[in-house]
Structure formats: structure tokens, C-alpha cells
Amino acid sequence: MNEHTDTPDSILTLVTLGLVVVGAVMVYSSSSVLAEARFTGSGFFFKRHLVRAFLGVVVMFLVARINYHLFIRFSKALLFAGLALLMVLWIQKIAHSGNNARRWIRLLGISFQPSDLVKLALVIYTADSLARKQDRIRSFVDGLLPYLLLYGFSMALIVVQPDLGTAVTIGVVLLIMLFVGRVRLSHIVGVGLASVPILYALIFWVGYRKDRIAAFLHRGDHVEDVSYQIHQSLIALSSGGIGGVGLGKSTQKLLFLPEPHTDFVFSIIGEEFGLLGTLIVLSLFLILLWRGMRIARNARDLEGFFLATGITAMICVYALFNIGVATAVLPTTGLPLPFVSYGGSSLLLTLVGVGILLSISRRGKRESEKVGK
């Protein structure tokens, strides 16, 4: 393979850095009151987020200089490590059945969410696998079934944490990758239809999930309990109007809106910067989608194509779900807004994903190759 190293996609780099900056500003603005009330000062969450964001950006640029095939080569090891950590959490859940479930593991003093590693490792592994088995991908047994078994096992470990939102997102990304990977459309539709009763059972057999659906369907009712988050989120968005109330002037962050710096940071953006602010954030994600798909189209090989498609889909599906929840288009999922929400392993591994995209763009087709096709 030709190891020429062109300049990585500068637009994707700028958009990503822009979203990270927006995230740093909004984490401080949205969390300052909560941090003052619960911890040592208004900058408690901001300082932690800033360190993680800086580390993530540094890692992103380092990853961009690494040949993305190295990640493909170690995809099985990454996936095994992630699944092993998920199983550790599952064992802890069984051993401490009376306690709330844990989604995090402490590694070197840092809270790490194994599902963040698993979702990225699954995308890398699937990209490699789809590229290698294109001659058999139309077969159900050799093509689709292995993915169903792998993803089914992985998603089950995530669901029992419990984290249904992440599991559903992983499933959506899988369907997108299978579609671009030339799996039979009838097989994909069949998987989608078969997932409906499973999803129904997972929602309505668990009380708090059923309450979330009830809050979504009847958000005008029970605004003091199950519909509280959605109601407060909509108040924040409507209060912002066109231009917003101004940076730092949100009233919903005054302990009215739960998790204003994580799940509902988009609502605070809407309140402080108005419709214009939310449209800017949406535009940045749309540009990211465009550049990610462009990188996929210009990839030198199928591995790069599938990998760029999967990473782009993962980031954009997360953004879609988070914004959908904040605007009451979707029921509450507990998913962060990529680059913007306060986070640790989620922010770091999302930036690793962008670094891989930049690596693929550096090794894309030359202009002469594109014209010659």
C-alpha cells in the first residue's frame, strides 16, 4: 500500500475543534450553579472537562498520524478488552444485586465507561469484516448471522448495566454499516422488524423505561415527576427565542433542569443562544456528516470506506438522539451530545474516532486517481 501522507481534512478538524470549544464553554455555563451547590466551586465540572478535552484533542492529532490499518489489525483485541470490562460490570451487578447498576470502571484513577470502547471497537471490527467477506455478504449464514450473534451478545451486556440507549444506538449504526456493506435489504428489514418486539419487551418490562415512554407520549401530564425533564428542557428552549438570553444567563440551570451539562446541554444552548445558537450547532454536525461521507467516498480501500462510514454514523446518530430528546422528538435516552456534553471516556473515544477519520483522509485517493476513475 502507498504510504503517502497528505494533509488531513482541515474542515473536519476545524468543525471538531469548534464543537469541542462550544462544549467547554457550555459545560462551564450549564454546570457552574450545580457545581457550586454540590462541590468545591463553580468550576468543578469545567476543570475536569477541560483536562479531558485537551487530552482528547492531543490524542486525536496523534491518532491522525497513525495508519488506520493498525486499528483494524488490533480490532479483535480492542473488542475483547471492551467486552471483558463489560462482563466485569455484569459480574459486579450480580454480586451486588441490591445496589444501583454501575456503568463505569476506575482505571488509573479515571472513570471509564467500557461501552464507549465497545461501540468504537465494534465499528472497527465490522469495517474490517465487511471488507473481507464481500463475496459472502449476501448469504444469511456466512454474511449476516455472525454480526447478529456478536452484536446481540455485546448489546445484551450493555442493556443489563442498564444502558438501553447506547445499545439501541449501536444497533442503528450496525444497520447502517450493513446497508452500505451490501447485505441483502430483505435481511436488514427482517432484523429491524424482529428487533421491534425485543425493544418493546425491554421497555415495558422495566418500570422507569415505561415511565419515560409515558412521559414522551403525554408530556403535558405529570410535569412534576416523569415528564419533568422533558418539560424543563422545552421551557429552556422556548425561553431562548431567536437570539437567546445571553451566555451564563440561563435560569433553567438554576437546579430546575436535571443534568444540564450532560444529557440536556443542547437545551441550555437553546436558552442562552436561542434558535440561532442551536442552528449553528446543528450546522456543525451536518458539516461533520458531509466531511465524514466525503472521506469514506475517497478512501483508498474498502476498510477505509466502511470505517469512515461507521464512525461518522456513530457520531451523528448520537447527536441525532441527544437533540431529539432535548426537543421532545424522542423519549429520554441518557445519551450525551458528542464533543459538547460533559464527559470522560465518551469524549476521549469520540475524538479518537475523529482521529481515525483524519487518518483515512490523509491516505485518501489523490486527485489524479479521482479524475481517472
Image: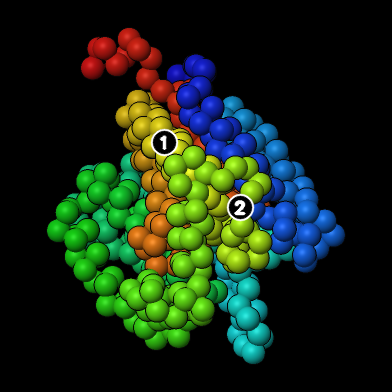
Label 1 SS: helix
Is residue 287 at all visible to an observer of this figure? Answer: yes
Q: Secondary structure at mark 2?
A: loop
Q: Residue at x 29, y 16 (%)?
A: 370
Total labels: the figure holds 2
Observer-nearest of 170 and 233: 233
Choose between 133 and 369: the one closer to the eye.
Answer: 369
Please say if the residues under marks 1 and 2 sit with CB atoms less than 8 Å apart.
no
Mark 2 highlights which residue? 250
Residue type, label 2: Ser
Q: Residue at left 62%, top 88%?
A: 97
Question: Quadrant where the C terminus lies?
Answer: top left
Q: Position of residue 257 (x, y in %)?
A: 58, 64
The residue that label 1 is drawn on is: 283
On the image, the x and y values in percent for residue 56 come to 65, 41
The crowd level at tag 1 (other Cα within 10 Å; few <14, some 14-19, many 20+) is: few
Residue at 68% across, 34% down: 58
The answer, for residue 169, to whether it is visible in the render is: no
